[in-house]
Image: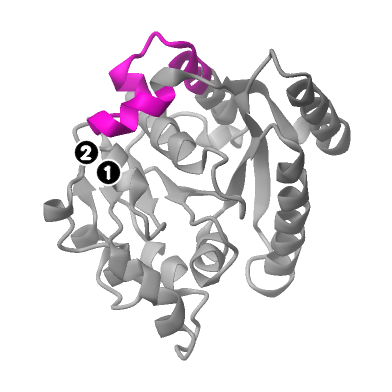
């Protein structure tokens, strides 16, 4: 199973929207897909229509109580897409894990030898605490959504430093598969400036596809649906389909077919 963490320590950059729609796009192309909601807010779970009554076993149980992954994953309305939902219990996991041995390897252990899915996305919380550290230690690679605004650049530099530390101490195989520019507004000159600065700094690491600001992307979660299902023809949905295609193109050759 190819495991991709979707992380950025800054909130409001489109992590959950990206996680939901990329997972949906991969499932639609035939990949058996798993999404792990590692954010205590549980927005990815809500955005896929998984209500609180369906969250008897959650990512908290997966990490803290070491419940088997097969018992934690639940089906969504999207064929081929399962989710490990989050509950508010996850907000206490950071404290509970402090005194646990191998506290950064809990998620990696939970995912090891799992064969029920071909690809796994991890929706990380907007911080660089133990939950995000677990995701980075478990992941093969990292996808970074980056909002096109000045302060996002500062958060990106801190995230890159964290990735280096994780590579040195916990997961030497971790790499960054790409940076996705989100909330792109062509009417805003600052958007173009930030985009140019990021591309000058990171080069080909930045995906060619940009995710625009789009009302339909914002509306979809309130209906418990990914934008790709809520309105597959809107510009936001088309952008995520293009991003998924570009993402697959960056997989190793042996991984490019589901």
Corner quadrant of residue 202: top right
Q: Residues within 10 Å of mark 1 (few under 14, many from 20)?
A: some
Identify which residue is drawn at 65% across, 56% down. 174
Identify which residue is drawn at 53% across, 63% down. 132
Separation of marks 2 and 1 at Cα, in angstroms = 5 Å
Residue lying furthest top in this view?
Answer: 233
Q: Residues within 10 Å of mark 2 (few under 14, many from 20)?
A: some
Q: Position of residue 135 (x, y in %)?
A: 51, 61
Q: Which mark is residue 165?
A: none
Q: Is residue 28 magenta?
A: no
Closer to the camera, 180 or 170? 180
Q: Position of residue 228 (x, y in %)?
A: 36, 21
Is 59 situated left or right of 16 in this image?
Answer: left
The prevailing secondary structure element of the residues shown in magenta is: helix
Q: Which mark is residue 46?
A: 1
Q: Position of residue 56 (x, y in %)?
A: 15, 62
Magenta span of residues: 217-241
């Amino acid at each position: 199973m190819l495991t991709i963490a979707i992380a950025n320590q800054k909130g409001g950059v489109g992590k959950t929207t990206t996680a939901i729609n990329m997972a949906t796009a991969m499932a639609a192309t035939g990949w058996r897909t798993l999404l792990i909601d590692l954010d205590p807010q549980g927005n990815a779970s809500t955005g896929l229509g998984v209500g609180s009554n369906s969250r008897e076993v959650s990512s908290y149980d997966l990490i803290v109580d070491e419940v088997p992954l097969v018992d934690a994953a639940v089906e969504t309305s999207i064929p081929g897409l399962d989710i490990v939902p989050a509950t508010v219990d996850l907000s206490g996991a950071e404290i509970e894990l402090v005194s646990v041995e191998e506290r950064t390897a809990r998620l990696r252990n939970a995912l090891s030898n799992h064969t029920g899915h071909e690809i796994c996305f991890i929706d990380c919380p907007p911080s660089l605490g133990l939950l995000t550290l677990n995701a980075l230690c478990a992941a093969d690679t990292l996808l970074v959504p980056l909002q096109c605004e000045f302060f996002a650049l500062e958060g990106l530099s801190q995230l890159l430093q964290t990735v280096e530390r994780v590579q040195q101490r916990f997961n030497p195989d971790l790499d960054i598969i790409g940076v996705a520019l989100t909330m792109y507004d062509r009417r805003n000159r600052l958007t173009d400036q930030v985009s140019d600065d990021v591309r000058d700094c990171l080069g080909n690491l930045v995906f060619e596809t940009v995710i625009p600001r789009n009302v339909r992307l914002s509306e979809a979660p309130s209906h418990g649906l990914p934008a790709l299902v809520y309105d597959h023809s809107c510009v936001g949905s088309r952008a995520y389909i293009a991003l998924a295609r570009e993402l697959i193109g960056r997989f190793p050759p042996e991984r490019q077919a589901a």
